[in-house]
Amino acid sequence: MNEDLARALEATTLDEDLLRHYSLTLGRDDNDGSHFYLYHALALTVRDRLVAQWRDTRDTYQQKECRSINYLSLEFLMGRTLNNALLNLDLELPVRKALQSWACDLEAVEQEELDAGLGNGGLGRLAACFLDSCATLQLPVTGYGLRYQYGMFHQRIENGYQVELPDRWLRHGNPWEIECPEATRRIRFFGYSESYRDGNGDIRQRWVDTQDVLAVPYDIPIPGYRNGTVNTLRLWASQATDEFDLTEFNAGSYTDAVAAKNQAEQITMVLYPNDASEQGKSLRLRQQYFLASASLQDVLANWVATAGHDFSNFAARNGFQLNDTHPTVAIAELMRLLMDEYRVGWNEAWVITTSTMAYTNHTLLPEALEKWSVNLFGDMLPRLLEIIHEINARFLSRVADKWPGDQDRQARMSIIEEGDEPRIRMAYLGIVGSHSVNGVAALHTRLLTRGLFRDFYELTPGKFNNKTNGVTPRRWLAHCNPRLSALLDETIGRQWVTNMDQLQGLVDYADDAAFAERFMDIKQANKAALARLVETSCGVGFSTGMIFDVQVKRIHEYKRQLLNVLHVILLYSRLLHNDTAGLHPRCVLFGGKAAPGYAMAKLIIKLINNVATVINRDPRLRDWLRVVFVPDYSVTTMEVICPGTDLSEQISTAGKEASGTGNMKFMMNGAVTIGTLDGANIEIREAVGEDNFFLFGLTAEEIETRRQHYDPEGIIAVDQGLAQVMQLLESGHFNLLESGIFAPLIAAIRNPGDPWMTAADFRSYVDAQQRVDDRFTDRAVWARMSILNTACSGRFSSDRTISEYRDDIWYADKRRD
Ligand code: 26V
C-alpha cells in the first residue's frame, strides 16, 4: 500500500473528505440534515479509499502472471455495499467518529442505500458471496454481469396477495460504480453467415448484415477482508449505436429511426424474475448472448493488447466459470471470436475453449433446464448456430466411437433435441464445451452423475466434480450479527473471520453455563431486533420467549412452504381444542417472492396470509401462536432475520433442492435446522451431528420408489391430525368471504401425482416439530444445540468453497505455462 493511501485512510482526512464530497461534489449546504446526501458523500469517501488499492491489485495480478478467472453470471445479488466496504476496510470506527459532528448515526445513513437486487435468489446471492471470498483469498477473479435498470421487483401484500412493484434501483444514481466508456464493445445480432475468401485465399466465415448494440461497462470495486485487495465486478449496460437506418432516415422518418434505438437499450432493462422457468423468451436469449459476447471480447481484447495474436498461452492464463446454463452460449461465442476474428483454426480453438470453460449446474428441476428453439436461436445468432451444429456433429461422432451402433444414446446425448420444434439443450452444450462440470452439494452432484447427466458421466467421468456451496462469513456473521461476533472474538480470537474452522473452538464451551448464558442473551437481543422488524412491516407483535420458527426463500412448490402451513394449521386446531400438552409457544415467520407468472406459488402466499390473519386476530391464541408473512424479502432483511432465528425450516422434497444457502446462514447464527435429507442439509447434519438437527421425511431414493404407489387420500384417512387440517382448509375456515380460492392447493395435496409429495412427509414433519418443542423448553439443552450449530458451521464458509474451485478447477493464483 503506498503512503498517500495510508494517509488517506486516517480518520482526520476521512472527516475532510466527507465534508468535501457533501458540499463540493454534491453541492449541498453543510448539515442540512439530509441522510441521503450524507450516505452518498460517505459512499464516495469510502470509494476514494478503494480506488488506489484497486489499481494496485490489478498491477499485482499482472506482475504475477497468474491465471485470471472470469465468473460469468446473469445474476449478482449484492445487497448493500457500504456496510460491507466499511467492514472489509476496517473503517467502521473512524466513520462513526466522523459522523458524530453530523449528529447522525451510521445505521441511519446505511438505511439510505437501496439493495442491488440483481438476482432472484440462491444462484445470484452465491455469486455475490463468491466475489467476497475471491477478493479475501486474493484470487484474480472478475465478475461479469448485466447492469439491469430494474432489479428484482419489490413485493407488497394486498389483501393477502402478492403485488409486484418495479425496482428502479439506479434512480438516484449509484456511487459505487465507475463507467468505463473506453472499453465499450459491439455486439451483433441477426443478419446471416457467409463464406468468403480472405487475403491468403483461405475460405472463411463471416457474420454480416447484423443489427448491432453497444455494451458499456460499469465497474464496481469488490474489497477483500482487510488485505488491500480490490477485485472487480464489471456490469454491462446496453446502448444503441448512433447509426441510423438510412432508408428510414432519408424517407423523413427521423423520429421513427431514433425511436427504434429503444430496442437496443431494452436488453439490460430488466432482470427476469423467474427462477424456475421462462422458456423461450427471445429477450432473455439476447441478454445471455450480450453478456457472453461483451465479456469474452473484453478478455480477448486485453489478451491481444499484450500477447498479440498468439493464443498458445491463453488457456494457461484465463478461465471462465459459467454460472448455470444462462451464459453457456459463451462456449460457441469463444469459438466464433477465435476463428472468425483471430483466425485460429477449429482444433486449436476447441482446445482453448474446452480448457478455459467450466460449468456449474444449480438445479435438477426439468422446467429450469434451458432449451432454446433452434429457429429462434438461428434467426438471432446465425453464426453461433452453425458453430453449435459443428460442435454437436463432432461430439456425436465421439459418442458413436465409444458406443458403436447405439442410436438411442446418440439421440439422448445430442446437443440438439429433435422433434417438431428442435431445441438446443444448453446444459449439454455446457458439458461438451467445458473441462469441468460441478454440482453444488454432494447429493446434488451424485444425482447429476447417476441421473440427468449419466450418459455424459459415463463418457467423461473425470469432468464431473462437486463443490458444496458456502456463504461469506463477513456479511453473514461479522456484519449481520455484531453481538455474536464480539463474543466469538473474545472467546476464540478474531481469526474466525477468515478461517471459519476456528469456530470448532466453541465446542469446548457448549457445556459452559456462563458462556451459554451469554450466547442465549445475544440470541434474545437479536430476536428483539427481528421482532421490531416484524412489528413495523406486519403490525404483529412477536414475543421473544417464543420459538422463532422461520422459512424465508423463494416461494416454490418444491420448497414446500405448504407443508409448513399445514403444521401451523395443526397447531391452530390443537389450540382451539385446548390441546396444549407438550407445546411451546411459537412465532412462525414466512418470507419470499413468487415468480409473477407462477399461480400456485402466489396462492401459497395468499394462504399463508389468510391463515396468519385468522390466527393473529384470535386473542385466545395470543400467547401461543403468531404467524406473519414479511413482505419484500431481500438480502438486507435476511441480515436481520437470520441472527434472530431459533429454528431454520429447510423442508424441500428430498432430491429437489440442489444445495440451499439460507440453511448455512441460519446455522452460522446459531439456529437449529428442521430439515429433510436434501441438498446441503445432509452435510450440515453430518457436520453438527444428528442430535443437533431435526431430521424428518423420506430420502431422495424413497421419494422415487414411493411415487409409484403414492396414495395421499389413504394417508389423510389414517392420520387424524392431517384429516383435521384438511377439514379446516376445505370447510373454507380461512377464506370465509372468498369461496373456493384454495381449491388448487387442496387438490395438489390430494393428488396421487403430486410431484412434491407433501402428505407423505406430514406425520414425520409434525413429529420432528414436537421434538423441537421438547428441546426448546429446556433452555440449557437448546443453548447447547445452538452453540454447536455455530461451532460446526465452518465448512459452509464460501472461503472453503472457493479454495476448492481454485485448487480443482481454476488453478488460479499459480503461474501455469
Ligand atoms: C432459471 C431461470 C430460468 C429462466 C429465467 C430466469 C432464471 C433464473 C434462474 C434460473 C435457475 C435457478 C437455479 C437456482 O437458482 N438454483 C439454486 O442455486 C442455489 C445456489 O447453488 C442453490 O443453493 C439452490 O438450492 C438452487 O435452487
Image (spheres, grey):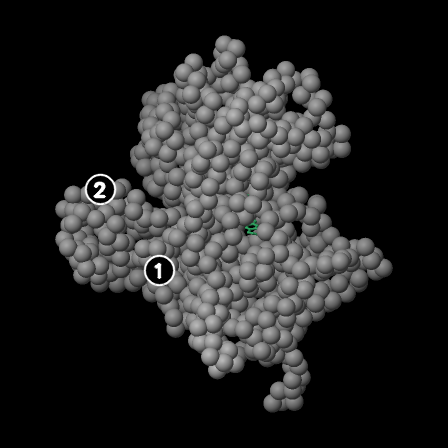
Residue furthest right in the image: 405
Residue on which the image places disc 2 = 105
In front here: 610 or 763?
610
Q: Earlier in the sequence, mark 1 or mark 2?
A: 2
- Left or right? Give the position of 602 relative to 194: left
User: Considering only vertical position in the picture, is 326 above or below 185?
Assistant: above
Distance from Cα at disc 1 to Cα at disc 2: 25 Å
- Kindly identify the residue that appears in the image at 30 percent across and 51 percent down: 89
Q: Residues within 10 Å of mark 1 (few under 14, many from 20)?
A: some
Between 776 and 291, the one nearer to me in the picture: 291
Do callouts 1 and 2 mark residues in contact (Cβ within 8 Å)? Answer: no
Q: Is residue 112 above or below residue 379?
A: above
- Residue displayed at 48% across by 82% down: 250
Q: Residue at x 45, y 63 (%)?
A: 236
Q: Which mark is residue 13?
A: none
Left or right, 575 with respect to 58, comes to right
Residue denoted by label 1: 177
The disc labelled 2 sits on which kind of residue? Asp
Q: Is residue 348 visible?
A: no
Considering only vertical position in the picture, is 378 above or below 526? below
Graded by Cα atoms within 10 Å as few (under 14), some (14 to 19) or many (20 or more), the crowding at tag 2 reads some
Q: What is the x, y in percent for residue 153?
A: 45, 47
- Is ligand 1 less than 8 Å from the beta carbon at label 2? no
> In the image, is residue 352 above or below residue 226?
below
The x, y position of residue 446, in whole percent, is 65, 44
Q: Is residue 152 visible?
A: yes
| Dot 1 amino acid type | Glu
What quarter of the picture does the N terminus occupy?
bottom left
Q: Secondary structure at mark 1?
A: loop
Of 540 and 342, the residue lying toward us: 540
